[in-house]
């Protein structure tokens, strides 16, 4: 075990990992093949999976501070490029545009259906992955994607129906800086341009989950300010945890990449906090180890300078 001086948390010693991209799953129904990046430890067996959904416009190459950290500490991290990525530059009048949120969920299920194929494409990985321990994670728009896989209900703006799009293969979720409830609290911009946020129902999520929210994440999507991104925790059922990152804006210090220009609150200590707490949670919820999570719960009280961890 190692101790992180900045946060006071503990964690396992990292081991070498490899990343392979792009792995391609044919996907005629989405109009583009599904391209995937896999990062995995070079040693170990019974490796749990993190299925990670990027934020709006990003791609499989993003979020290296999280993907690298998780992979070097025992997890197989799978990152697709969703259709809303800037790499596709889909025009506004494309008929797929209003259903991007659904295509994202379909992408994730396509990956789960193709796990054997993907593993076989990574040298030395086949037979070392535990398909019974899968956690969905995501940032921003990706947080909604992860939530949908564990029971979040979104009213389809085209049909008016809120379907259950969850997948029983996913055991837990991590939602980072993601959207809260809709209704009258949405700004006119969000109501018009992001109709899939108009009606979100968190009450059906029964799987364990960790929500990460920055207390300075004041998005132009809600009139409620930073508290909006805590809704996936406050409006959900029990067995959830909330990490509030003090001073954290939407990219939580820089989780979307190393020295990326989009980060407005660049802060290595915040990134380290998110890395360490999410890893401790992943190890806890997948049954690998409970010690680091217990330490995080003890250390991250209201007196800690970087953040607060609470649960219900």
Image (spheres, rainbow, N blue to C red):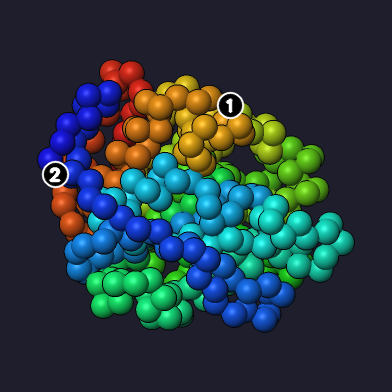
Q: Which label sits on residue 212?
A: none
The residue located at (14%, 44%) in the rendering is 291
| Residue in the foreground of this view, choosing between 83 and 60 | 60
Helix, strand or loop at label 2? It is helix
What percent of the width, then of the height, locates residue 92?
84, 57
Toward which corner of the image does residue 45 lie, by quadrant? Answer: bottom left
Within 10 Å of the Cα at label 2, are there few (<14), some (14-19), or many (20+) other Cα atoms? Answer: few
* For residue 162, side relative to residue 77 (left or right): right
| Circle 1 residue | 264
The residue located at (61%, 34%) in the rendering is 262
| Residue in the foreground of this view, choosing between 161 and 291 | 291
* For residue 205, side relative to residue 6 (left or right): right
The N terminus - image quarter: top left
Task: Give the number of the mark in front: 2 or 1.
Answer: 1
The residue located at (33%, 46%) in the rendering is 69
The C terminus - image quarter: top left
As drawn, the residue found furthest toward the front would be 123
| Residue in the foreground of this view, choosing between 24 and 177 | 24
What percent of the width, then of the height, locates residue 209?
37, 52
| Circle 2 residue | 291
Residue 215 visible at all: no
Toward which corner of the image does residue 28 lie, by quadrant? Answer: bottom right
What percent of the width, then of the height, locates residue 192?
80, 48
Helix, strand or loop at label 1? It is loop
Within 10 Å of the Cα at label 1, are there few (<14), some (14-19), or many (20+) other Cα atoms? Answer: some
* For residue 200, side relative to residue 297 (left or right): right
């Amino acid at each position: 075990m190692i101790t992180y001086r900045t946060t006071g948390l503990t964690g396992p010693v990292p081991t070498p990992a490899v990343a392979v991209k792009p792995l391609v799953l044919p996907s005629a129904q989405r109009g583009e093949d599904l391209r995937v990046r896999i990062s995995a430890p070079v040693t170990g067996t019974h490796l749990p999976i993190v299925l990670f959904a990027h934020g709006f416009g990003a791609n499989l190459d993003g979020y290296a501070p999280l993907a690298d950290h998780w992979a070097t500490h025992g997890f197989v991290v799978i990152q697709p490029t969703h259709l809303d990525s800037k790499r596709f530059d889909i025009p506004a009048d494309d008929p797929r545009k209003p259903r991007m949120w659904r295509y994202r969920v379909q992408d994730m299920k396509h990956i789960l259906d193709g796990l054997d194929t993907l593993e076989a494409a990574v040298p030395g990985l086949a037979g070392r992955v535990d398909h019974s321990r899968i956690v969905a994670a995501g940032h921003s728009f990706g947080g909604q994607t992860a939530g949908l896989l564990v029971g979040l209900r979104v009213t389809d703006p085209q049909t008016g129906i809120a379907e259950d799009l969850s997948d029983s293969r996913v055991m837990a979720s991590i939602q980072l800086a993601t959207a809260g409830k809709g209704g009258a609290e949405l700004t006119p911009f969000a109501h018009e341009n992001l109709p899939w946020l108009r009606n979100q129902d968190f009450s059906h999520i029964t799987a364990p989950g960790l929500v990460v929210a920055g207390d300075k994440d004041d998005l132009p999507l809600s009139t409620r300010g930073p508290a909006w991104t805590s809704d996936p925790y406050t409006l959900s059922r029990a067995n959830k945890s909330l990490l509030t990152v003090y001073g954290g804006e939407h990219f939580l210090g820089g989780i979307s990449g190393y020295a990326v220009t989009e980060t407005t609150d660049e802060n290595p200590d915040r990134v380290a906090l998110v890395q360490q707490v999410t890893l401790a949670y992943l190890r806890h919820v997948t049954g690998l180890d409970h010690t680091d999570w217990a330490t995080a719960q003890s250390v991250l009280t209201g007196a800690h300078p970087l953040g607060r961890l609470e649960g219900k």
